Amino acid sequence: MKTSFIVGYFLALGNPAMIGTALQVALVVGSILFAINHGTSVIQGKMTQGRWASGLLTYCVPYAVSIHGQYVAQRQRSQ
């Protein structure tokens, strides 16, 4: 993987043209994953600070994956 690809990807994380779609994906997929991974703890009132941090990352991963997909597709279209 070239350095320019990695730099371009990190720049794409804040690309306004990609953010909307990525946020929608993060909200839907992140919520499903949050419910699977932390739902019982929320219901039982056993969420710790560490679990909340993990829950936040649950939303970050689908955001990053969505941006990656959009970025790769954009690069392929421009070639």
Image (cartoon, rainbow, N blue to C red):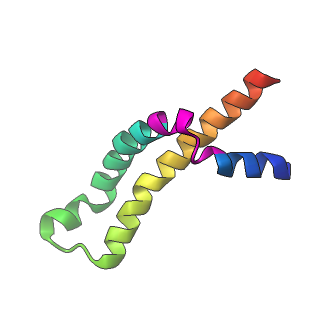
Q: Residue at x 49, y 46 (%)?
A: 63
- The image quadrant where one finds the C terminus is top right
The foreground one among 72 and 43 is: 72
Q: Is residue 76 left or right of residue 10?
A: right
Q: Is residue 47 above or below residue 14?
A: below
Q: Is residue 39 left or right of residue 65?
A: left
The foreground one among 15 and 66 is: 15
Q: Residue at x 82, y 48 (%)?
A: 4
Q: Residue at x 45, y 35 (%)?
A: 20
Region rendered in magenta? 12-21
Q: Is residue 42 left or right of residue 53?
A: left
The foreground one among 60 and 46 is: 60
The foreground one among 15 and 47 is: 15
Q: Identify the residue at the far front of this view.
A: 16
Q: Quadrant of residue 69?
A: top right
Q: Is residue 54 above or below residue 14?
A: below
Report whether residue 1 is seen. Answer: no
Q: Residue at x 66, y 36 (%)?
A: 71
Q: Identify the residue at the far left of this view.
A: 44
Q: Is residue 56 above or below residue 62?
A: below
Please name the predominant secondary structure of the magenta segment in the image: helix
User: Residue 22: where, in percent of width, then height?
Assistant: 48, 39
- Magenta-colored stretch includes residue 41: no
Report whether residue 51 is seen. Answer: yes
User: Residue 64: where, in percent of width, then height?
Assistant: 55, 48
User: Residue 66: where, in percent of width, then height?
Assistant: 54, 40
Q: Is residue 52 above or below residue 29?
A: below
Q: Identify the residue at the far right of this view.
A: 2
Q: Is residue 65 left or right of residue 44?
A: right
